[in-house]
Amino acid sequence: MRRISNLALNQAFPEASGLSGIPLDNQVRIARDTANPYDRDAVGIWLGGHPKTPIGWLYRKDGNRDAVLQKLDTGGEITGHIEQRIRRQGGKPQKVVVFWL
């Protein structure tokens, strides 16, 4: 099933990766971020070619987070991509992760 989640961007990613933007044809890997000191159940999003620093995380209250954690805990692998969507309220752009469970 196709899922879409808002992406909490990692402010340290641009400096760590040397990228000033996200490539249009991007691929991401979704996995537990065991190095996150603030959230023991953090779900990190890693951009292909940049395995050391996550580009961001799923929000703690994200509706897909429990299903993602369950799949990851059973040994499943989750991949997807990042898109930019326009928010309905205020019309501001928002980065989202699109993936399949």
Image (cartoon, rainbow, N blue to C red):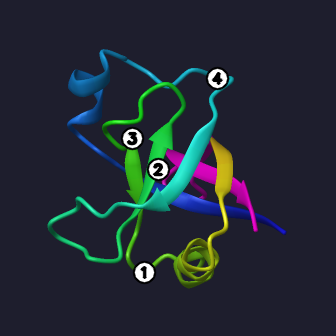
Residue placed under numbered mark 2 in the picture: 45
Q: What are the residue bounds of the magenta stretch?
A: 82-101
- Residue 50 position, x and y percent, is 42, 29
Residue 26, above or below 82: above
Q: CA distance from mark 3 to mark 1?
A: 18 Å
Find residue 98 and name its label: none
The residue positioned 32% from the left and 36% from the top of the image is 52
The residue type indicated by label 3 comes to Ile
Q: Earlier in the sequence, mark 2 or mark 4?
A: 4
42 vs 21, left or right, is left
Q: CA distance from mark 1 to mark 4?
A: 27 Å
Residue 13 part of the magenta segment: no
Residue placed under numbered mark 4 in the picture: 24
Can you tell which quarter of the image residue 63 is in? bottom right
65 vs 37, left or right, is right
- Residue 5 position, x and y percent, is 58, 62
The residue type indicated by label 4 comes to Leu
Q: CA distance from mark 4 to mark 3?
A: 14 Å
Q: Residues within 10 Å of mark 2 (few under 14, many from 20)?
A: many
Q: CA distance from mark 3 to mark 2?
A: 6 Å
Callouts 3 and 2 close, C-beta under 8 Å = yes
Q: Earlier in the sequence, mark 4 or mark 3?
A: 4
